[in-house]
Image: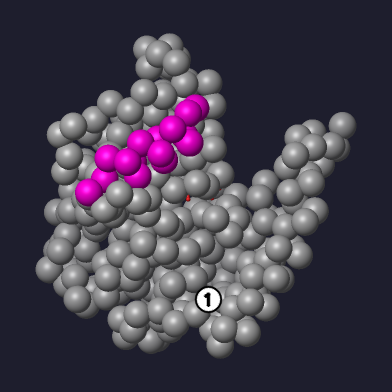
């Protein structure tokens, strides 16, 4: 069977209408006169963004916000979702886009070689990736097997350290590295399971990396986002319930969206946050301050 035929019918249908959906989005933006983002004066900077899967991805909203603030963006995407990433490139100014997978050393080598050639040095590294097997994002946490535990941690947590190490020789001295996390690292959210453990390790990695890279003037922070409907989120059993609960319990009585996260990322890339490092910053409409 060809790879295409192996994909679920729902995904193939989505893939078929996707380019038209993106074209329409582009047209709407043009008619509005372009999306105006807050001016963080990032003109001339360069960013490497991991984790764009489609136009809903948090990474995409960050990449677009950086692009609209004058940053040249490079996207690292997984080969299996190339057809969803390519239509987005027309919305960026002179982007670089290259396939990469954080568990594949050869692809990591060629990706960073491409960045070295295209960018020379760059300023921002965005880590917006996570993965766990679907069966480990439901039911009892203890049902996770050794391999499932390893995979979730390798992709969702260890990869930040791997990318930081590879990026370091190419990053300018006042650079900023940002990872995406969730409150399930600190409190129990049924079904989030192994991803909560991976996010706890990711947040600890942020602190240790912030210490190491501080000597070079590079800052490392994590954004802890409230729930946002994305491809990855759809893998978490009962995600719609999480969304509803978050909006009911948060002091601001609403859900956040990916643009809220992108705005925080802009701030963390800008000089306005020049003395903030090693932090986990919540963009969750206040949800995490509540006891009951
Ligand atoms: N959506 C939410 O509610 C939410 C909330 C808090 C934090 N986050 C975090 O935000 C980040 C982005 O997720 P999203 O919600 O935008 O979903 P998404 O599905 O759009 O993004 C996840 C990305 O991870 C990438 N990825 C997975 N395995 C990879 C691998 N081996 N190599 C390279 N890339 C790989 C996928 O290609 C995809 O682009 C994740 O770290 C997620 O845990 C999401």
Q: Position of residue 243 (x, y in %)?
A: 41, 40
Question: Within 8 Å of ligand 1, the CB of disc 1?
Answer: no
Q: Residue furthest right?
A: 1
Majority secondary structure of magenta residues: helix
Q: Position of residue 258 (x, y in %)?
A: 43, 58
Q: Is residue 244 magenta?
A: yes
Q: Which residues are magenta?
A: 237-251
Q: Is residue 5 magenta?
A: no
Q: Position of residue 97 (x, y in %)?
A: 59, 66
Looking at the picture, does residue 10 appear above or below residue 163?
Answer: above
In the picture, measured across the screen, residue 42 lies left or right of residue 57, that is left
Q: What residue is at 22 percent from the left and 49 percent from the top?
A: 251
In the picture, measured across the screen, residue 166 lies left or right of residue 119, that is left
Which picture quadrant has residue 123? bottom left
Quarter of the image with the C terminus in it: top left
Count of picture labels: 1
Kindly tell me whether residue 205 is visible in this rendering: no
Q: Tell me if mark 1 has few (under 14), some (14-19) or many (20+) residues whose alpha carbon lies within 10 angstroms of its own.
A: few
Residue closer to the observer: 156 or 136? 136
Q: Position of residue 201 (x, y in %)?
A: 27, 36
Looking at the picture, does residue 265 appear above or below residue 6?
Answer: below
Quarter of the image with the N terminus in it: top right
Residue closer to the observer: 186 or 150? 186
Which picture quadrant has residue 217? bottom left
Q: Circle 1 is placed at which residue position?
A: 118
Kindly tell me whether residue 67 is visible in this rendering: yes
Q: What residue is at 44 percent from the left and 16 percent from the top?
A: 139
Which picture quadrant has residue 12? top right
């Amino acid at each position: 069977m060809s790879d295409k035929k192996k994909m679920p019918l729902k995904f193939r249908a989505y893939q078929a209408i996707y380019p038209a959906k993106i074209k329409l989005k582009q047209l709407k933006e043009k008619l509005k006169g372009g999306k105006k983002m807050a001016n963080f004066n990032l003109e001339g900077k360069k960013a490497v963004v991991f984790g764009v899967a489609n136009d809903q991805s948090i990474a995409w909203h960050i990449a677009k916000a950086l692009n609209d603030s004058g940053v040249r963006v490079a996207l690292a995407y997984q080969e299996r979702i190339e057809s969803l990433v390519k239509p987005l490139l027309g919305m960026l100014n002179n982007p670089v886009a290259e396939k990469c997978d954080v568990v594949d050393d050869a692809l990591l080598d060629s990706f960073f070689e491409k960045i070295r050639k295209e960018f020379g040095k760059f300023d921002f590294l965005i880590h917006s990736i996570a993965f766990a097997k679907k069966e480990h994002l439901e039911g009892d946490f203890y049902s996770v097997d050794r391999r499932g535990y390893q995979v979730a941690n390798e992709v969702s947590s260890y990869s930040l350290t791997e990318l930081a190490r590879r990026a370091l020789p190419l990053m300018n001295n006042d650079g900023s590295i940002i990872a995406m996390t969730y409150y399930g690292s600190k409190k129990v959210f049924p079904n989030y399971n192994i991803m909560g453990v991976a996010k706890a390790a990711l947040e600890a990695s942020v602190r240790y990396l912030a210490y190491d890279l501080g000597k070079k003037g590079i800052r490392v922070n994590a954004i802890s986002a409230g729930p946002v409907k994305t491809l990855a989120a759809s893998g978490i059993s009962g995600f719609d319930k999480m969304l509803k609960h978050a909006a009911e319990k948060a002091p601001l009585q609403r859900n956040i969206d990916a643009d809220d996260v992108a705005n925080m990322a802009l701030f963390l890339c800008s000089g306005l946050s020049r003395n903030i490092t090693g932090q986990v910053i919540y963009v969750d409409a206040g949800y995490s301050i509540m006891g009951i």
